Amino acid sequence: MWQKIIVFASGLLLSSIVYADGKQLHDTACLQCHASLGGGDPYQLYSRTDKTVKTLAGLEKRVSYCVKAADVTWTEQQKRTVVDYLNSTFYHFK
């Protein structure tokens, strides 16, 4: 029983750390450009009704594109972390 609780708690802690890392990477590299595209609101791109990203694969592709456009050097793991942050916060793809 305790083992299951420890595994569950560890999973929650790890997902919280991944979320925080993804948000930090995103906010540092993306908010300035997104604000210019979203009329001053960098999060408007995620809440608009005519979203262009419609699948998890599309989100992964968009993040890869934006990494190149922003000229940042993220590892594949960092890109995955940002995708996970965006998906869990805004998109909710399965």
Image: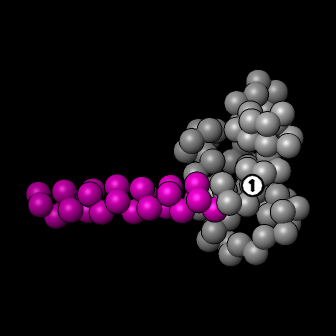
Write down the residue under mark 1.
Answer: 30
Write down the quadrant of residue 75 in the picture.
bottom right
Q: Which residue range is magenta in the image? A: 1-25
**Residue 45 visible to the viewer:** no
User: Is 13 contained in the magenta span?
Assistant: yes
**Depth order, front residue of 72/92:** 72
Residue at 73%, 50% (x, y): give it: 31
**Depth order, front residue of 8/65:** 65
- x and y, in percent, of residue 67 in the image: 80, 64
Residue at 42%, 56% (x, y): give it: 16
**Depth order, front residue of 75/69:** 69
- x and y, in percent, of residue 9 in the image: 26, 57
Left or right of 93: which side holds 40? right
Quarter of the image where the C terminus is located = top right
User: Is 28 contained in the magenta span?
Assistant: no
- List the single residue furthest toward the front: 40
Write down the quadrant of residue 43 in the picture.
top right
Q: Secondary structure at mark 1?
A: helix
Q: Is residue 74 above or below residue 36?
A: below
- x and y, in percent, of residue 66 in the image: 82, 58
